[in-house]
Amino acid sequence: MADAPIIYGPDGQPIRREVLTASVAGPTVTGVRSPFGAYPADGLNPRRLASILREADQGDPISYFELAEQIEERDPHYLGVLSTRKRSVSQLDITVESADDTPEGKSIADMVEAWLRRDELQFELFDILDAIGKGWSQTEIIWDTSEGQWQPKRLEWRDPRWFRPDQRDGVTPLLRIDAGDAFAQGLPPAGPNGGGYAPLPPFKFISAVIRAKSGLPVRSGLARLACWSWMFKAFTQRDWAVFTQTFGQPVRVGKYPAGSSEKDKDTLFRAVANIAGDCAAIIPESMLIEFIESANVGSSHQLYKERADWLDQQMSKAVLGQTATTDAIAGGHAVGQEHRQVQEDIETADAKALAAIINRDLVQSWVQLEHGPQKVYPRLRIGRPESKNVTQILDGISRGVPMGMAVEKSYMNDLLGIPVPSPGADGRMPELLTPSASASPFGSMFPSASPQQRALAAAEMIMHDVRDPIAVLSDQAARLCAPGSDALVDEVRGVIETSTSLQQVQEKLRALKPGAAEAQMAGLMRMARVIANLTGRASIPDA
């Protein structure tokens, strides 16, 4: 590692390798990066929410990030659709494309692909996709150099409250550091709480920005929209709870006769009050309690439910682009398919954005640390495998190969998902499936066809071959006669298998009348003679 080449970061300065091996953005209970935050969602109102968003726009997004986290904790619908969007991407297949076809390029790609098989990767990608909700996320790369190599050991999600955008551009992330570190680096203080904000070390962070709309990262996350929807729904739920508490039970009215004493009145009042909670009371026989039910309770509560459901549907549209997969309001199979396609489009966009971020901040950094700067770097791709019509492809290959089309065996194995056979631990090849010895080349290609159909297919291939016709006829003579000869052999084999002596075989063969096999063979021979005659005539130059 002492002879490692000098690598420069985006700022043009050499990177400090000793910084890469240390944790620089972890929590500090007694410092400025406390893992415990405030609860701005408590008692939230439009004036307070507007103030929080305005603070975030001006470069102080701490309260906004705290509010975004609280909404995920308190709104089951928002948590559900947001988690669905993140998990659908974090579980997709990841493939690696080598930078070039050189052995070194393939070796580097294999290195990256081997690291991607880690079981923890799915959870790490899920944390990186926190940028979908909050607009950005910062993930610290913990590098492993235990054996003299550079390799990402793990990817640690860092609380977005510990970062803020540079006020000069509103985009560049800065890390919050303690006052002593800020003073040592000559950085200005971060405010009344002390500390300061420093640039992120190169090759140390995965800075993910996934925008729901164009603009600054802090204004482009879905949480900015969700906070308004959640606040309005919280008001609705509060009013609904008050309505239910007030009108969910009938009004109790106690009546006492004239001349009742204060003691009797107190007794009646306690009885009426206790019925609400205890549902039981005793009163003197001379007193009366009436229960008055509201006639419109059943229809009045529907307004609150419809408003809450409508807000959830709007949130589904914002996060997943549709409502059919979350709210069960699809208008039939066609509408459901269309809504699902919209969700898949969003999934594809998220996958491409995530792949670009990892290629930029992790793959290229890793390759430079381990192998030095390269002209081109391997690229990983995230997405669902492309669907292929295997039956149609196999049919085309079965027709094209006899006509000269070249197809690699490895392609067929990949197409069918069948691994290429390899020697076992003892060095011997495993037992492989093989075609029947009596099957002709065309019989294996057209297993359900009759011998005559196979012969016609063979002749058609010969006639459409672009090579020299005479060469084709000489090369394909055996194949052309194969269906008929196979049929003849089958007839003779049947005679031999059913006979008990050589004399009986001779008698059966003499008694055997020409059948379909002989007719097919004769037809094949006539067909070959016709093709040869026509080919010869076609070769005669015009006078």
Image: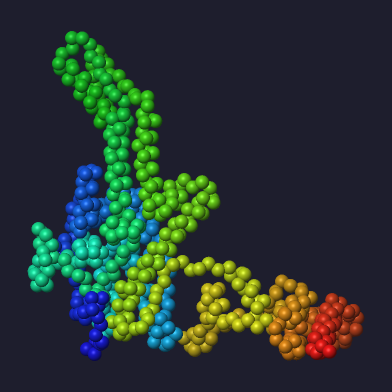
Front residue of 431 and 410: 410
Q: Can residue 284 be seen in this view?
A: yes
**In the rendered view of the protein, which quadrant contains the C terminus?**
bottom right
Q: In this view, does 504 lie to the left or right of 162?
A: right
Which corner quadrant of the image does residue 95 belong to? Answer: bottom left
* Applied colour scheme: rainbow
Which corner quadrant of the image does residue 239 belong to? Answer: top left
- Residue plotted at (8% across, 69% down): 183
**In the rendered view of the protein, which quadrant contains the N terminus?**
bottom left
- Residue plotted at (22% across, 11% down): 257
Front residue of 89 and 48: 48
Q: Is residue 14 left or right of residue 354?
A: left
Residue 45 drawn above or below residue 534:
above
Q: Where is residue 31 in the image (x, y as percent from the top left)?
A: 12, 64
Residue 287 drawn above or below residue 120:
above
Q: Where is residue 416 in the image (x, y as percent from the top left)?
A: 55, 73
Q: Is residue 429 left or right of residue 526?
A: left
Q: Which residue lies furthest to the front in this view?
A: 543
Residue 55 drawn above or below residue 124:
above
Residue 374 drawn above or below residue 228:
below
- Residue plotted at (25% across, 80% down): 8
Q: Can residue 130 be seen in this view?
A: no
Which corner quadrant of the image does residue 105 belong to? Answer: bottom left
Q: Position of residue 234 (x, y in %)?
A: 29, 43
Query: How many numbered marks appear?
Result: 0
Q: Is residue 297 left or right of residue 543?
A: left
- Residue plotted at (40% across, 46% down): 313
Front residue of 64 and 242: 64
Q: Where is residue 469 in the image (x, y as percent from the top left)?
A: 75, 87
